[in-house]
Image (tube, rainbow, N blue to C red):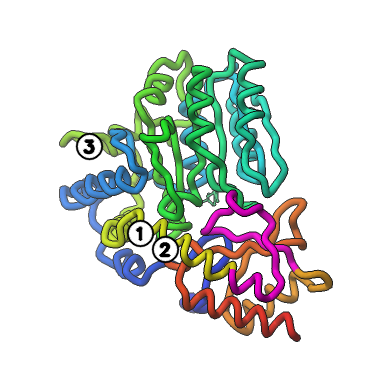
Amino acid sequence: MQSFNPPVRTLMGPGPSDVHPRVLQAMARPTIGHLDPAFIEMMDETKQALKYAYQTENELTMPVSAPGSAGMETCFANLVEPGDRVLVCINGVFGMRMRENVVRLGGEAIIVEDKWGEAVSAEKVEQALAANPDIKIVAFVHAETSTGAQSDAKTLCDIAHKHDCITIVDAVTSLAGSELRVDEWGIDAIYSGTQKCLSAMPGISPISFNERAIKKLTSRKTPVSSWFLDLNLVMGYWGEGAKRTYHHTAPVNTLYGLHESLVMLTEEGLENAWARHLRNHEYLKTGLESMGIDFVVKEGDRLPQLNTVWIPEGVDDAVVRSTLLNEFNLELGAGLGDLAGKVWRIGLMGFSSRKENIILCLSALKEVLQK
Ligand SMILES: *Cc1c(COP(=O)(O)O)cnc(C)c1O
C-alpha cells in the first residue's frame, strides 16, 4: 500500500467544486480538542459568519457535522412528526429526496410536480395549499442542481406563510453562489453544503432555523427519531453560552476548512460573490452559444453556478466526458434521470467560478467535439 496522491483536476461538475488552497492549508493545521477554548472561539466565529452568508439573525445557525444530505435530514427529522402533511415541490432529484425524507418520518407528502428544468410553479403551490388546509410545512429546492433551475424562494415562502405553513428550503447549491436572503424572504428552516459555492471541502452542512421553526420543534408531541440529528441535543454543544457539553466529536480540521472559506467570503463580500458567479455564467454562456450549444433551462430561471446544456446531436456523452477527464483533467457533470446522456452539467461554483476555468472548458470542449 502507498500514500494516495490524487490527480489534480479542474472540477466543473455539480460538486464538489475546486477547493481553495487556503482551505486545504487550513485543514492541515494541528488538531486540537473539540472543547478546547481556542476551538470554541473558532466555532463562535464560524456561526457568526454563517449568519452573514445566510443573511440571517437566527441564533440557531450552525454547521451539521455531515454532508448536505444530513442537513436535509436534520431539517425534516426535527420538523416533521408522524402524521404531518408536508407539501413537497418536485422539479428534480433533490425534491424527490425531500419526499423520501417525509415518508420515512411517517409524514404524508403532498406533491406539486414541475417538469425537470423548470422552476417550481407558485400557482400550483397556491392551489395545493388552498385545497389542503391541513398542510403544515412547504418544502422546496431553491437551486435544483440536477437541472440547473432556480425557483423564486421569496414568493414561495410568502404563499406558504399565507397558509400558516413553515418552509424548509434546500440551499445546498445557492448559498454564496446566488442571491439568498433568509430573513428578508422569510425562510424558516434551511440547509446547505460546503462543497458547492463556498469553495470548501465536502462534508459539512450549514443549517439555520428561525423562531417559527424552533416553535414547531419544541412543540413536538414525539421525540425526534434520530439521536444524532436531534437539535435539542446538538445545541448543547453548538449553542450559545460558556458551558458546552460533549455531543459528538466535531470534525475539527474540516471545520478549520469551513472557517477559512468563510473568512474568504467575508473578504470578497457576499454580494460580490453573487456577482462573480453571474459574470462568469455570462462568460461561459457566450462561449457555449458561439459553439451552437443550447441551455436546457429558460433564461431567467437559470442558475449561474450550474449550467445545464444539451449535448449536440450525434455526440457520445461518455466519450467526451472521459476524454476531457483523461486528457485535460477536466470534470464536467453528467445528466441525471431522464436527462442522462442528453445533457452536461457545467458547474461554476465557488473557487471553480474563475475565468481561466471557463477558457479551459471552452477550448477543451471545442477540441474534443471537433475530433
Ligand atoms: C449536492 C446537493 C445535495 C446533497 O449534498 P451532499 O453534500 O452531496 O450530501 C442536496 N441538495 C442539493 C440541491 C444539492 O445540490
The label number, if any, that marks residue 276 in the structure image: 2
Of marks 1 and 3, the one in the foreground: 1
Query: Is any atom of residue 1 visible in this view?
Result: no
Residue lying at 53% horizontally and 43% vertically, measured from the top left:
142
Q: Amino acid at mark 1?
A: Asn
Q: Amino acid at mark 2?
A: Arg
Residue lying at 25% horizontally and 36% vertically, measured from the top left:
245
| Mark 1 in CB contact with mark 3 (< 8 angstroms) | no
Residue at which label 3 appears? 244
* Residue extent of the magenta highlight: 286-311
The label number, if any, that marks residue 215 in the structure image: none
Residue lying at 74% horizontally and 84% vertically, measured from the top left:
370
Which type of secondary structure does the marked residue at label 2 adopt?
helix
What whole-number distance in Å separates the C-alpha atoms at marks 1 and 2? 6 Å
In front here: 186 or 141?
Answer: 186
In the rendering, at what x and y percent does residue 281 appear?
52, 64
Per the picture, the main secondary structure of the magenta-coloured stretch is: loop
Give whichever of discs 1 and 3 has the lower sequence position: 3
